[in-house]
Image (spheres, grey):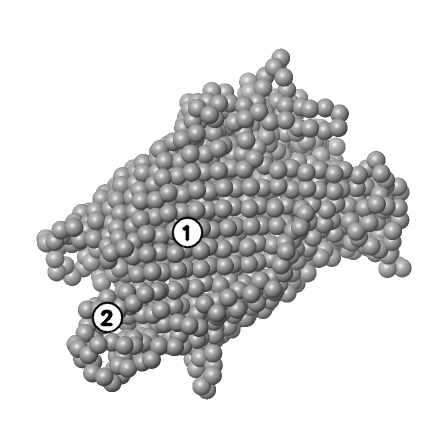
Amino acid sequence: MNTFPLTIRQLGVGMALLCLTLSCPTLGHAQTGGIQGKVVDENSNPLAGASVMIKELDRQAATNAEGLYSFTNVPQGTYTLSASFIGYQTAERSVTLSSAEQLVDFSLVSSGESLDEVVVIGYGTARKRDLTGSVASVQAKDFNKGVIVAPDQLIQGRTAGVMVINNTGQPGGSTTVRIRGNSSIRAGNNPLFVVDGIPLSGTSARSGRPDGVGGYGSDGGNPLSYLNPNDIASMDILKDASATAIYGSRGANGVVLITTKRGQAGTPTLNVMASTGFSNLLKKPEVLSADEFRQALQFYTPDDVSSDFGGSEYAFDAITRSAITQNYSVDISGGNEDGRYRISAGYLDQNGIIETSRFKKYTANVSSNFRFLESKRLGLDINILAAQTDENAPPIDVGVGFTGNVISQALQWNPTLPLRGSDGELAFQSSDLINPLTSLAAYKDNPKVNTILASFAPSFKITDELEYKLMYSLTHQAGRRTGRFIAGMINPNDVNNGGAFIRNDAETNHQLTHTLSFNKDIAADLNLNAVVGYEYLSYDTRWNSVSASGFSDLGDIDYFDYLRYSIANNRDVRSFRSPTNELQSYFARVAFNYQDRYLITGTIRRDGSTKFGENNKYANFPSLAVAWNISNESFLEGSQHLNNLKLRLGWGQTGNQEFPSGASKDRYIFDPQSIVQANFGNPDLRWESSSTINAGIDFGLFQNRLSGSIDYFRKTTTDALFEQTLAQPAPSGRIWVNLDGEIINEGVELALAGDIVRREDWNWNLGVNATYLKNEVSGLLGYYETAQLRGQGFSGVLGQRMVSGQPLNVWYLAQFEGIDPTTGTSMYRGLDGEVGTDVDPALNKFYLGSPNPKYLLGITTAVSYKRLSATINMHGAFGHYLFNNTMATVLGVNNLSNRNIGHIFFDPQAGESTSNSASPSNRYLEKGDFLKMSNLTLSYNVGNIGSTIRNLNVSLTGQNLFVLTGYNGFDPEVNTDGTSNGVPSLGIEYIPYPPARTFLLGVNFSL
């Protein structure tokens, strides 16, 4: 399969030429009379992207990186100019214009929170004061700093109700994103991400590793990693159904709207961002040192100390490193009233803290906006993004057997045994205890993904109130993964000498959207804002792979380049194409605003999907929301302390269709020997749907120096999608069904922002967001299990259940009651209440807590003094339990002899026997509470240097500096995938890629 016809460099050059070709004809108008000036903040710092408007002419300009703006060809007369910027009070100036140029400057004062801030909503925008639903907006200036690979990491800890978990410390690794908790058993729980109006599939063409190759796999990667965070202007999070219902069957888990940066009118400006730094290990489980290991041998096996080899080695230090990171981003933008453009390029090179691991990303982006005709009614927006991610993935796989992966091998390595012999060669101990350095040398894995995301959007303003817009978008990803595993390096006696594979994946998505927007004051005090539209989406995925094993001794070469030298019977060729998933939709939204006091918004969407059964292909998703701006009532007019008070109430229905294409139809597996029916069709398969009620209050006090919101929500999900195994004696196979019962999510969100100090020389602001979450399954018949635990003695054990009366994914494990001092073995409690060593832990399981956090917390504070500023961001989660699968099966006392053990298990007073086998129980269940210092940035605004370098800013950033927790594992945020039969798990840690602490030195400037 041709994975990508063009290189990223060719695409970047081509897009640059295209943009310049389109832009140049629009930049040469003659200037007669005009208005120009500069917009700055209280400290005289330029405000880039501020909006300046000539009210009488309804003309608008945006400031460039220096804060400069200009209007040309302005008729003589007297005008009112207004300047506005998010987070600042709007300022106005009066100017009388003759044929000469007029200079009008603005100095804007911070307003804490601007109600005129424009927020992106589904298929449109709205002023923050006009919102009726629960919507949170995070601007670029408030994004998290540091090594940010994917945009979901930009908002971690920044918004109430939003939980972002870094599942792994691996560069480019996956994340778990939840808005207001989990609400589905088998369908997806991740929100819908929309980039400049393009809904993303939530999947990636990052190729998987074929089965049967041997060796290891690695984390699945982040499907958003191809986006350059430096290209993003804002992220708006739609949380309740009244806001997300316009996305219908994809809005059940919330919607994140990503808006990228656009060109600013004015002379061309070149912006440069560069940073470099290093990462090291943040946290790890403690194991015995060489001296402690000898003491343990003397205590547990005094008659046999043959496992003491006399050395002192700490293997984890040998596989980790201080890893260098480099990140560069350049963009150029400019234009005028007829056209604007922005061209950017980015490069990220992030070495992982595990030796050999690495993540590289190349990005290029072009955005152009043109306005034609004298009336400027005809518009054209073109956006093109191209990216390539290139990884060296480490030998870390949670599905490994007894020998473990490189993490467990390093933790278990005998600390008295040198990793290398006196001749410098890597040591080999036994076939079941592997030198972690040989794993790194024997394994090579290179996933690579090329992405192109392009949109073409002409528009025509039919009247001043009515506008038609067409958008076509194409998203194409091509992935290629090559790997090899030299078994002979691990075990010299292995005659098969390893395996190799090549896999190619492709994903192509098309979108066609028509919208007709209307915005008019239909009466003196009544505004109508409406949109109707039609949308068609198609998603197509396919892959093919070749794998082989049993190679001849080829020396130090990559096996995947010489598959023909493998044993013929050990070669495997496979291909797959998913049924094309198509979604056809009709939607509408109507919003009324009476006197800026009474607001009502209604939406409806009708979706038709090829995923569902013949009898239920279409479904309707309505919503209704109202709001009352109490602060605009006459009885509060002139209030000195209360500047904003708004009540909101909303209801809506959304859907969830995140399950495989073709799931409602009969499906078969073909191989050379037989045809097997893998899936049985269900023509009555219905949409999983959620109904949400949201009540909120927004407030601003003391000239908006203190502002915030409080929201209560209750979300009820019904007709949960689930894949069941057919009961015997029916033919073997599976069928998708809708489950009885409900999943209820309920909670309260609090967001506060305050300007504690607001003075000429220095400012201090503080933001806090907190969330209470409650989740419960109701009316479910029976129970369903998930959370596959791993390791010796844990194979096939499932640790979580979906059961009525409890939250999703609750822990059901044996209840550990200590060590029997007479036998040194574990005691457990039986369901009958009896305690003893003869209780079978597999047959006596209890409800022992939930992995779902009850409380989320985010804290942000920023202090500035003249040109020096500091920003701190912390986030945490509380009220949940994690299963430390690493401690349970990798570091237990029963491993002691030729393997190391966990420090917490070496307790001579406990009297535990080395023959005591580990069993899944609450012995390894720990509180997951944590508070993490996720970001600390110090920056200094140098200003201009000469006439060339402008707005020079130097910063020092620390990322993941420390974590306050009682958890004994790697990181309380780690979430190892324990999916069983497609049902996701939560809260498991098993020998993951460890978390990293990062320090970066950065510089930003304009030319």
Farthest-out residue, left: 635
| Residue 310 % position (x, y) | 84, 53
Task: Name the residue at 42% across, 72% down.
Answer: 25
Q: Amino acid at mark 1?
A: Met
Q: CA distance from mark 2 to mark 1?
A: 30 Å
Task: Name the residue at 26% across, 59% down.
Answer: 116
Residue where numbered disc 2 is placed: 54
Label annotation for residue 695: none
For label 2, the SS is strand
The local crowd at label 1, few if under 14, some if 14 to 19, many if 20 or more residues have their Cα within 10 Å, is many
Residue where numbered disc 1 is placed: 471
Please, is residue 745 above or below residue 36 in the view? above
| Residue 417 % position (x, y) | 82, 51
Task: Name the residue at 36% across, 60% down.
Answer: 379
User: Considering depth in this image, is 236 or 162 the residue closer to the camera?
Assistant: 236
| Residue 99 % position (x, y) | 23, 84
Q: Amino acid at mark 2?
A: Ile
For label 1, the SS is strand
Farthest-out residue, top: 729
Is residue 29 left or right of 260 when viewed as pictured?
left
